[in-house]
Image: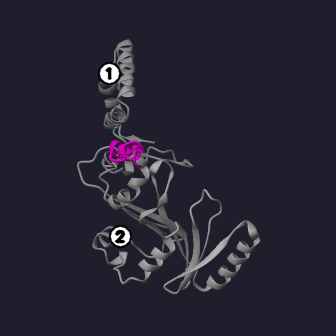
Amino acid sequence: LCVLSSPGGAAPRGQTLPEMVLLVDLGREQAAFAEHLEALVRLAGPALTVSQATTAGVTYRTFRPSPQWPVLAYGYMGDLLFVTVGAETPARLITVSAAAAPNLAADAAFADAYAEIAGENEQWVLYADVPALLATLGPMTAHALDPGAPSPAENLLVALGLDRVRRVTASVRVVDRGLYTRLRILTPAPHRGVPMLLSGPPLTTEDLSAAPGDTEAMVIVRLNTSLAWAELCRVLTAQNPHRASRLDRAVDGIEQRLGVSLEDDVLAALGDPWM
């Protein structure tokens, strides 16, 4: 599944729609799949108007389920099924596919990120160039009254410390009859928000030994509660200063009634491993 870089059409309130593309390698099943798909389309009868178009020798079919929907299309490039969203998307996809442009495997940044998670018997791979992805999706989340202002989604990413993430790669492999998953998130230090909470020392065998021998399920994380509380307050202040002020007053009131400090007497006394 991919998103092409330019908007696919107008959306409500001046926003934009993406051009979405789903690609499926059907292999030897392409002919049988195409026959079944055409049978399903015929079942719709006259209620669905299907048109045919050709770009650079590739024929595809387009339709719009209702006036409120964008134009959908499907077709085949060899054994590859493509399903698209956007009136101009099929032609763009075919043009891009026919161009002699370098593929992702030739990109040095991708190769570096992928090398850390690659292995035999891969079943699923994820890769995201986060800055490029945000640049593509930004117009869709722009503020309707002030397009130049940061969108709520952008503000949330900044508050969570995820705005500095550069690349995300992940893979799922079959290893010894089980699934083995690796995830790599590239983000520069100093960390804040979610990345900071995941940057503590690793768990040890001693931490795991706290679970009883007859445990049926377990989740254990290393969490510095003082840092977590500080980050929670920072995020809340960035997103809603009024609510942050109310929280401060509520905590102050509780501390005065109990005669203890939440940070110094409670959070500082808690250990890092949480099970």
| Residue found at x 23% / y 48% | 190
Label 2 CA crowd tier, 10 Å (few <14, some 14–19, many 20+): many
| Residue found at x 29% / y 52% | 164
Q: Where does the magenta region start and end?
A: 142-161
Query: In terms of secondary structure, where does tag 2 sit?
Result: helix
| Residue found at x 37% / y 21% | 251
Q: Nearer the viewer, residue 169 or 130?
A: 130
Q: Magenta span has 250?
A: no
Name of the residue lying farthest toward the left: 190
Name of the residue lying farthest toward the top: 257
User: In the rendering, at what x and y percent does residue 83 appear?
Assistant: 56, 71
Residue 19 in view, yes or no: yes
Q: Nearer the viewer, residue 244 or 154?
A: 154
User: In the rendering, at what x and y percent does residue 208 appear?
Assistant: 42, 48
User: In the rendering, at what x and y percent does residue 113 appear?
Assistant: 32, 67
* Mark 2 or mark 1, whichever is nearer to me: 2
Query: In terms of secondary structure, where does tag 1 sit?
Result: loop
Q: Is residue 203 above or below residue 22?
A: above
Label 1 CA crowd tier, 10 Å (few <14, some 14–19, many 20+): some
User: In the rendering, at what x and y percent does residue 168 appear?
Assistant: 37, 61
Label placed on residue 261 = 1
Q: Main secondary structure of the magenta part?
A: loop
| Residue found at x 32% / y 55% | 165
Splitting the image into 4 quarters, where does residue 181 fall? Answer: bottom left
Q: Which residue is mark 2?
A: 114
Distance, label 2 to label 1, CA atoms, is: 46 Å
Q: Is residue 35 above or below residue 5?
A: below
Label placed on residue 159 = none
Question: What colour-coding does the image apply?
Answer: one colour
Name the amino acid type tagged 2. Tyr
Splitting the image into 4 quarters, where does residue 40 fall? Answer: bottom right
